[in-house]
Amino acid sequence: MLAAITWRQFINLGKILREIAISDSVTALNDSAVENIEHMFTDTARRAAIFSIIHLLGVSLFF
């Protein structure tokens, strides 16, 4: 009887740990995606700003 209760609790613990692991993985992937999007946005904004400055200064990029 005690072995059956222990086994059931062991199975329940495994399910709980799996759910925690999945939740943590989803959170980590979402955080990584947000960080990558922020990097792309700031890189694009930086390039646009540089292009605008070059355009305002009248520098030709084509020789």
Image (cartoon, helix red, strand yellow):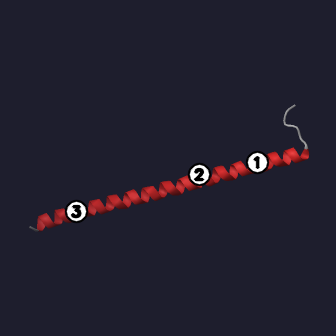
Q: Position of residue 35 (x, y in %)?
A: 58, 55
Residue at position x 82%, y 48% from top? Answer: 52
Q: For this view, does 51 lie left or right of residue 1?
A: right
Find the distance from the CA under tag 2 to the CA under tag 3.
Answer: 39 Å
Q: Position of residue 4 (x, y in %)?
A: 12, 64
Label 2: how many Cα within 10 Å (few below 14, some 14–19, many 20+): few
Residue at position x 90%, y 46% from top? Answer: 57
Residue farthest toward the left in the current orientation of the protein: 1
Reading the image, the residue beneath label 1 is 48
Q: For this view, does 44 lie left or right of residue 58?
A: left
Amino acid carrying label 2: it is: Asn
Nearer to me, 45 or 2: 45
Which is in the foreground here, disc 1 or disc 2? 1
Residue at position x 85%, y 45% from top? Answer: 54
Reading the image, the residue beneath label 2 is 36
Reading the image, the residue beneath label 3 is 10
Q: Earlier in the sequence, mark 1 or mark 3?
A: 3
Residue farthest toward the top in the current orientation of the protein: 63
Q: Earlier in the sequence, mark 1 or mark 2?
A: 2
Find the distance from the CA under tag 1 to the CA under tag 3.
Answer: 57 Å
Residue 19, by quadrant, is: bottom left
Element type where label 2 sits in the image: helix
Residue at position x 31%, y 63% from top? Answer: 16
Q: Earlier in the sequence, mark 2 or mark 3?
A: 3
Q: Position of residue 10 (x, y in %)?
A: 22, 62
Element type where label 3 sits in the image: helix
Find the distance from the CA under tag 1 to the CA under tag 2.
Answer: 18 Å
Amino acid carrying label 1: it is: Ala
**Which quadrant is home to the C terminus?**
top right
Element type where label 1 sits in the image: helix
Q: Could you tell me how many numbered marks the image carries?
A: 3
